Amino acid sequence: MYSLAITDEHPVVTGFRSETIEDKKIAYNAISKQTGKVQDIVGHVVDIVNFHCSKQTYTDEQGVVTDFIKTILLLSDGTSYYAKSNILFRSLADFVSVFGMPDMWQGGARCRIVMSGKGYALEFIDFVQDEKTPF
């Protein structure tokens, strides 16, 4: 079973296995230049091929500091979407605990992005089948 945990000592969790320069370019572009917000694709069925999660803090005008987790989802079409949602991170962590890390998803994980309380969640549909998918 796999586990995603973000702590002060390990503030980033990622599925990227950047072994080549091309892998590193894809990871960097997904992390640094998101296409949009997850709220833009609520209700859509998407093929998630990777993710990047990082602990962030926000300080409001009154000086109140709030911790949250920024989750970036990389889709099969090369677009990436982010959410500042602990709920989405927990949903992704549950998904990873059952299905493993992205390198085990073969062609990607087909999910619907849904609202869950005051955040977003993944509703698993199926794995994207390609010539490498064994099922």
Image (tube, rainbow, N blue to C red):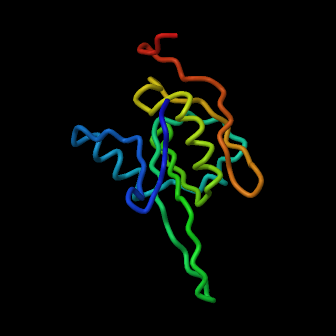
Residue at screen point 63% across, 43% down: 91
Q: Residue furthest right?
A: 117
- Considering depth in this image, is 36 or 97 the residue closer to the camera? 97
Residue at screen point 38% across, 60% down: 9
Numbered marks: total: 0
Q: In the picture, residue 86 is in which quadrant?
A: bottom right
Residue at screen point 44% across, 33% down: 102
Note whether 27 is above or below 20 in the view shown.
Answer: below
- Considering depth in this image, is 12 or 20 the residue closer to the camera? 12
Note whether 110 is above or below 14 in the view shown.
Answer: above
Q: Position of residue 106 (x, y in %)?
A: 44, 23
Q: Position of residue 105 (x, y in %)?
A: 47, 26
Relative horizontal placement of residue 14, taking residue 63 as reference (left or right): left
Relative horizontal placement of residue 44, taking residue 14 as reference (left or right): right
Note whether 119 is above or below 134 in the view shown.
Answer: below
Q: Residue furthest bottom?
A: 62
Q: In the picture, residue 83 is in which quadrant?
A: bottom right
Relative horizontal placement of residue 40, taking residue 99 as reference (left or right): right
Q: Position of residue 71 (x, y in %)?
A: 53, 53
Residue at screen point 58% across, 60% down: 84
Q: Position of residue 104 (x, y in %)?
A: 43, 25
- Considering depth in this image, is 133 or 57 the residue closer to the camera? 57
Relative horizontal placement of residue 23, taking residue 15 as reference (left or right): left
